[in-house]
Amino acid sequence: MGNVTKLSNRRSHDSNEWQLRVDLAAAFRLAARNDWHEAVANHFSLAVSSDGKKFLMNPRWRHFSRIKASELLLLDTDDHATMQKPNAPDLTAWSLHGRLHALLPQARCIMHLHTPFATAIASLADPDVKPIDQNTARFFNRVAFDMNYGGMANTDDEGERIAKLMGNKGIMMMGNHGVLVCAATVAEAYDLTYYLERSCRNLVLAYQTGQPLHVMTAQVAEKTAQEWESDREQFHAHFSEMKSILDDTDASYAD
């Protein structure tokens, strides 16, 4: 088996990797349903090795709504010939996700998106997700910021710059670009992305009133963020419920 692999069915690999494939494929389908996708751009990846260097990612230019578990690419950050292969991933995806998985082993699942409301906030001179309600408070002091967009992320140097800025944070507001979400599991990354987009929607709506924001105190915002972090079972229940909805309507993601 090479470093870039397309599985034909679940019998082609062990059950642990197959379940990771199914979960990641479900996340793509759900992202499309939530209107988080953008044409055939944007990428999700998921580590399958303990060091994070072997990871799954969507094939080049495949629409999120059509992705299946068996079609996900299996990549290796140490395989320098990846981009010379016939089924090479998108260059920007390899440059970003490849370096993130190589340098941030704790970032098991990585989602990069241009969701409408989060991208709108990321495009402001002040892209801070201000704690104005319970949802936005989840991200208090937990967001990294990249304010130096320089064009497409198509080099290893750019991926390494983003990895350095991300550090141990789980969210990055990418100025003039979009958002980056890193988490331990697909379920947690999906839940973070869901609430980040809703939080940014709330913030956009509040800004649109033209009235001053009622921002929480740092003490209350931090307390709320910690309460979010203690409720990890709910994150997994959310994703499980969403997969059940997919199963009821179109279970082909798990093929």
Image (cartoon, rainbow, N blue to C red):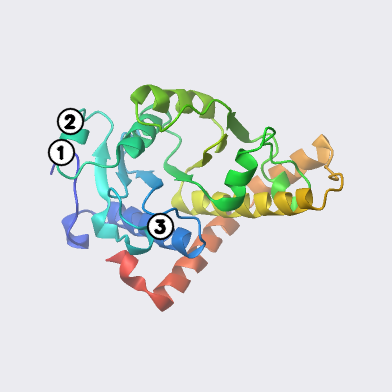
Q: Amino acid at mark 1?
A: Lys
Task: Residue under label 2, please give it.
Answer: 81
**How many angstroms separate mark 3 from mark 2 (CA)?**
26 Å
Q: Is residue 167 visible?
A: no
Query: Residue 8 appears at what percent x and percent y?
Result: 17, 59
Q: Amino acid at mark 2?
A: Ala
| Number of callouts | 3
Query: Residue 21 appears at what percent x and percent y?
Result: 32, 55
Residue at the (21%, 30%) spot, across then down: 79
- Sequence-earlier tag: 3 or 2: 3
Q: Is 255 drawn above or below residue 151 in the view shown?
A: below
Task: Residue under label 3, please give it.
Answer: 28
Q: Is 166 drawn above or below residue 213 in the view shown?
A: above
- Sequence-earlier tag: 3 or 1: 3
Q: Is 154 drawn above or below residue 182 in the view shown?
A: above
Badge 3, how many Cα within 10 Å: few under 14, some, many 20+?
many
- Label 2, secondary structure: give it: loop
Pointer 1 and pointer 2: residues touching (CB < 8 Å)? yes
- Label 1, secondary structure: give it: loop
Q: Amino acid at mark 3?
A: Phe
Q: Is residue 202 left or right of residue 247?
A: right
Image quadrant in which the C terminus is located: bottom left
